[in-house]
């Protein structure tokens, strides 16, 4: 396998990729942004891309949600959870008082905002393409335009020329980022009993009850939603799609049945993948929402036509 990830080496995204089976021995090419990583996958340059999708403190990574939603054949085939801990690094001899400007990824800055307000209230923030890119910029550029960076402790370990001025500076000590491995037209991973399915569902029409129509497709089939986010499609003001994760696999009859229902309500729906959950939590459903109940229901309706399907029932029984 040839992978790409939001780089350079030392990002949390690389940590997520290295936890994938055999990825450490595979070819890994860094990308400078999430859209660039996904373009490499869709263009066939690499087999899969590891990208951040949501953080427990700052929420969805919109670049990922939008790029996946607009891609033709993007498939999520795995997810990874990484606990997040940040350090502040600078050139040796720099003090907190010297700090005019600090650089890091925007999602990282959002997770240390309170710490920064309390500890370095005089410092400005400069967005970086990733935490590791900000840290390495201190070493590679003569005048990076900032005196310090916020990154993972791994970057500091890998680059002893950087001095750690503060550790564990995240405002929420239990922060976690969720990453997804995205491939193109990939076969669907086998169900494990602890799976998620990701969908992109355009809001069908601007009318009362449209969202309820979508949500009902899940609730009547006993399907739990673990994430739902609305994003503008970009077409015009008020045009939205929903990025949705549900518990279950497309091999589960209730999920396939819900997809049929959703397609009637919102024909532009996209299936983005069914894949094992990183937290291994089994999906629990009542008997009436399990495969045997769907089979029994179909058999019962078929039994009402003992002579076989009448000619005019074009769509089956
Ligand atoms: O900059 C990195 O190291 C990344 O992997 C990106 C990213 C993100 O996009 O959320 C990943 C995890 C942290 O929450 C902060 C930044």
Image: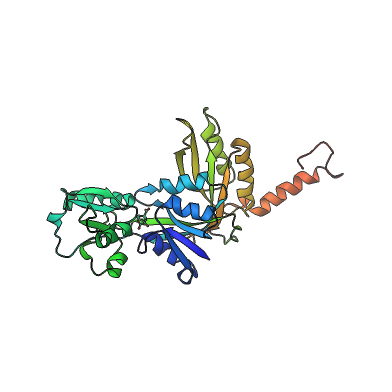
**Residue at point 25% right, 57% down?**
149
- Say whether residue 173 is left or right of residue 13: left
**Residue at point 48% right, 58% down?**
49
Q: 313 above or below 222?
A: above
**Residue at point 31% right, 66% down?**
154
Which residue is the extreme one toward the front?
142
Of 162 and 111, the residue lying toward us: 162
Q: Is residue 36 visible?
A: yes
- Say whether residue 64 is left or right of residue 204: left
Residue 242: x and y, percent?
49, 41
**Residue at point 56% right, 35% down?**
213
What colouring style does the render use?
Answer: rainbow
Residue 129: x and y, percent?
34, 52
- Say whether residue 151 is left or right of residue 63: left
Q: Classify residue 169 by image quadrant.
A: bottom left
Q: 145 above or below 280?
A: above
Q: Classify residue 219 by image quadrant.
A: top right
Residue 44: x and y, percent?
55, 56
Of 102 and 113, the residue lying toward us: 102
- Say whether residue 10 is left or right of residue 125: right
Q: 70 above or below 129?
A: above
Which residue is the extreme one toward the left?
97
Quadrant for the C terminus in the image: top right
Of 211 and 138, the residue lying toward us: 138
Please tell me in which quarter of the rendered image ligand 1 is found: bottom left
Q: Is residue 215 visible?
A: no
Residue 286: x and y, percent?
58, 51
Q: Classify residue 292 by image quadrant.
A: bottom right
């Amino acid at each position: 396998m040839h992978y790409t990830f939001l780089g350079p080496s030392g990002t949390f995204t690389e940590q997520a990729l290295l936890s994938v089976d055999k990825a450490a021995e595979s070819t890994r090419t860094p990308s400078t942004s999430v859209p660039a990583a996904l373009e490499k996958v869709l263009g066939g340059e690499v087999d899969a891309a590891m990208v951040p999708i949501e953080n427990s403190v700052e929420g969805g990574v919109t670049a990922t949600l939008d790029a996946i939603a607009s891609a033709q054949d993007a498939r999520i085939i795995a997810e990874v959870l990484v606990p997040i801990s940040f350090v502040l690094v600078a050139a040796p001899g720099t003090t907190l008082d010297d700090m005019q400007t600090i650089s890091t990824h925007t999602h990282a800055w959002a997770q240390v905002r309170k710490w920064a307000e309390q500890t370095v209230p005089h410092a400005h923030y400069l967005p970086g393409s990733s935490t590791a890119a900000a840290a390495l910029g201190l070493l590679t550029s003569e005048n990076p335009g900032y005196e310090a960076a916020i990154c993972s402790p791994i970057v500091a370990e890998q680059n002893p020329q950087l001095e750690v001025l503060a550790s564990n500076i995240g405002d929420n000590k239990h922060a976690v980022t969720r990453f997804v491995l995205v491939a193109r037209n990939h076969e669907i991973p086998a169900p494990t009993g602890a799976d998620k399915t990701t969908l992109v569902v355009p809001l069908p029409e601007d009318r009362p009850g449209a969202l309820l129509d979508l949500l009902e497709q899940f609730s009547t089939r006993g399907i739990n939603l673990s994430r739902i986010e609305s994003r503008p499609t970009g077409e015009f003001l008020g045009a939205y799609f929903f990025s949705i994760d549900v518990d279950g696999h497309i091999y589960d009859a209730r999920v396939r049945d819900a997809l049929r229902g959703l397609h009637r309500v919102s024909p532009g729906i996209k299936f983005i993948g069914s894949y094992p959950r990183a937290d291994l939590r089994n999906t629990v459903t009542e008997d009436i929402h399990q495969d045997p109940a769907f089979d029994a229901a179909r058999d019962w309706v078929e039994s009402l036509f003992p002579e076989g399907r009448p000619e005019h029932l074009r769509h089956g029984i």
